[in-house]
Amino acid sequence: MRVSLSAGLILVVVLGLVFVPKALQYGDVKVTVVLERVQDSPLVVRVSAVSARLSLDTYRAWVNETNATAAPLNFNINPLAANATWYGNVTFTDNDGDGALSVGDRFTIVRQPGDWVYDLSLFNSVRDKDAKAPCPCPVVIFRFP
C-alpha cells in the first residue's frame, strides 16, 4: 500500500514538473512588437522592440498594398519563416538567426510603381490562442506611404 501511494505521488510530481512550465510559458502572454521604417526603396521595416521571445512559427504577417486605381494586393505570410520571400514582393530576415522574432529582424517590401499605401500587420498564435470575435487581433499594424 505504501509503495503504490509513493508511486502515485511521484507520478503526480513528475507530471507537474512536465506540464506546469509549459502552461506558465504560454499562459496569458502579452506580446507587443514595435516596428520602425529604416529605408524607403525598397521599404525596409525593422523590429525595434519585442516584449516576449517567441519562435517565428508562432507569428504570421499580413501585407496589404492599396492603390486608388488598382485592385489591392494582399500577402498572407503564414507562418513567418526566416530568410524567406513570398510572392516575390515580401521578404522577412531573421537578422540574428535565433529562430525567434527579435530586435533587428526586418521585413523588406518591394514597392509597386505609383501611389500605394502599405499595411504590415503581425499576428501571434500564442496571444490569440483563445481569441473571441472580432479577434484574432494584430500584435502591431504598421502603415506607410
Image (cartoon, rainbow, N blue to C red):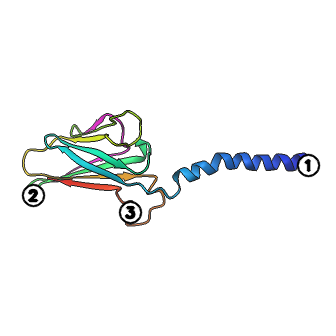
- Quadrant in the rendering for residue 141: bottom left
Q: Is residue 95 above or below residue 135?
A: above
Q: Is residue 52 left or right of residue 120?
A: right
**Sequence order check, earlier mark of 3 and 2:** 2
In space, the residues marked 1 and 2 are separated at their CA atoms by 77 Å
Q: Which residues are magenta?
A: 72-86
Give the SS element for disc 1: helix
Q: Which mark is residue 26?
A: none
Q: Nearer the viewer, residue 63 or 46?
A: 46
Image coords of residue 134 (percent x, y): 37, 66
Please name which of the two marks, 1 or 3, marks the residue nearer to the observer. Answer: 1
Task: Tell me which residue sits at (70%, 47%) in the image.
Answer: 15
The number of numbered badges drawn on the structure is 3
Which residue is label 1 attached to? 2
* Distance from Cα at disc 3 to Cα at disc 2: 28 Å
- Of the two numbered discs 1 and 3 on the same chain, state the one appearing first in sequence: 1
Residue 77, above or below 137? above
Q: Position of residue 34 (x, y in %)?
A: 31, 52
**Dot 3, crowdedness within 10 Å: few (<14), some or many (≥20)?**
few
Q: Which one is nearer the viewer's eye here, 6 or 38?
A: 38
Residue named by callout 2 = 68
Q: How far apart are the two marked residues, 1 and 3, measured between alpha carbons?
A: 51 Å
Q: Residue at x 12, y 44 (%)?
A: 112
Considering only order in the chain, which callout, 2 or 1, is on the residue closer to the N terminus? 1
Q: Position of residue 33 (x, y in %)?
A: 34, 52
* SS for callout 2: loop
Amino acid at pointer 1: Arg
Query: Could you tell me if the residues under marks 1 and 3 are in contact, i.e. CB atoms within 8 Å?
Result: no
Residue type for callout 2:
Ala
